[in-house]
Image (cartoon, coloured by chain):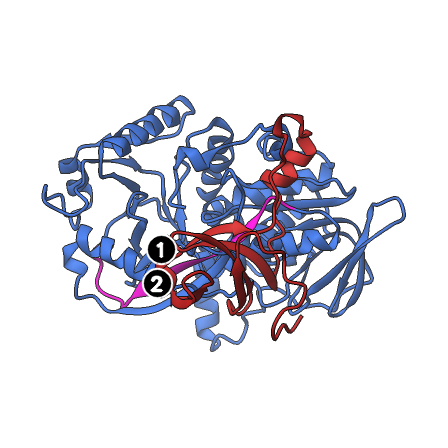
Amino acid sequence: MKKYSVFAIAREAMRGHKGWEEQWSSPEPKKEYDVIIVGAGGHGLATAYYLATVHGITNVAVLEKGWLGGGNTGRNTTIIRSNYLYDESAGIYDHALKLWDGLSQELNYNVMYSPRGVMMLAHNVHDIQVLKRHVHANRLNGIDNEWLTPEAAKEFCPPLNISRDARYPVMGATLQRRGGTARHDAVAWGYARGASARGVHIIQNCEVTGVKRAPNGAVMGVETTRGFIGAKKVGVVAAGHSSVLMNMAGVRMPLESYPLQALVSEPVKPVFPCVVMSNTVHAYISQSDKGELVIGAGTDQYVSYSQTGGLHILQHTLDAICEMFPMFTRMKMLRSWGGIVDVTPDRSPILAKTPVPGLYVNCGWGTGGFKATPGSGHVFAHTIARDDPHPINAPFTIERFRTGRLIDEAAAAAVAH
Amino acid sequence: MLLIRCPYCEEERPELEFRNAGEAHIARSADMAATSDDDFEKFFFIRSNPKGIIYERWRHMHGCARFFNAVRDTVSDRFLMTYKAGEPKPAKLPGASK
């Protein structure tokens, strides 16, 4: 792997950019690997990267039915924050946030992590109580989060409408200054490049169609559209399709898959300095470095794998955006799209061993997995390499739905579901 | 937006009038206190989440307000049929591809 640097750019500029090498190789699949990761999104590629760098396991294949980063990694609204209510969530999301800081240097790849601040709006007394509770809980966990008056919120984010007669009046806000955004594609590409350079095979257009198990129940490998590939350890990191894959191994999951939509506007000059979220009216917005407003909507109400969603969901979100930011009322929207998100009953992820020996699962990130990408990959690699969870992901088991030991961010409503 | 046929109103109406109520044909135990943790997990949390044909409940919230069941393909979002609550799971589906 040739290092990217200002000198590399100068050198290539001198010779007509003929010396850039492929960022990752596309080898033919081998007959057997030590570990197979199913799903080449951010989480799967990060898992492979940390298996190689932290645990020295490089005989790894990452199988992807489509193209690398073409699922929810390329479809999310790139928001990064760690202001979750419960200790377990704070642990895993802040682990990720700490890795975001410095990730570009570690990967030698600009993931454009921009800690521009994530603001969450309160529109009623209940919101104020819930969000202040979050501020206190976050601070007890060592996570920065602060309460802003409407005036202070307006000062931090000038486009905000804090008029008392707004349809959704702003009664205050929380601000996590370390929160922000990153370039979603670059995260997948950077991890893919780093993993590939260490010997990991990234195999695209290779759909897993079955999971093969030995008579004792242990995993032997996976059937794919490119033939059988053996491995004693298989990690499923397949977002909306996780339950489909787990069914192939005979494991029924506490998951439901829903369409989640987002949209972008035409690109404009820098007008929006931070990320603003409103859980109550289901809207969140930021501006990409290209200049587009990036707007996230809520999920549709029904299970679907269609990667589309209802137009009324987008309209509902835009109603709220225009009310809170009147300057955007004449903004044209360019594109909208949907991704399929796998949602658990308590809205917390599952990163765990499974009842099947050698089968591991990293799923259930629901509507907000992008922010966790580095931390998720880091602790999932540990779980696979040691056959034992990292202390950070130890609470995120499948069994919690039998024991009742939930991590109930659904009730805590830290996120717009 | 989906168009959904309410089997009580016998009319196809826009999705906005309806509320999805999750997977159908999951029977609640008559004696919940005697239900084991494993069975409760299956009843309460585990879902089939199929890529393909799903049997699901809908409620005609802003119409007759009644619950009914539907059969839908989760890949195309096309409804194959709807039927009244309490009717058995249909053995044969109209125009089902799989």
Magenta span includes A263: yes
* Residue A66 in view in this figure: yes
| Left or right position of A35 against B66 | right
- Give me the residue at 21% from left, 63% from top: A269
Q: In the image, residue A62 lies at what x, y percent?
A: 67, 58
Q: B3 or A401: nearer the eye? A: B3
The quadrant holding residue A137 is top left
- Give me the residue at 50% from left, 31% from top: A91
Find disc 2 in the rendering and name its residue.
Answer: A263
| Left or right position of A201 against A313 | right
The quadrant holding residue B38 is top right
Q: Circle 1 sits in a helix, a strand or a loop, which is it?
A: strand
A380 to A231, vertically: above or below: above
Residue segment shown in magenta: A253-271
Find disc 1 in the rendering and name its residue.
Answer: A297
| Left or right position of A362 against B8 | right
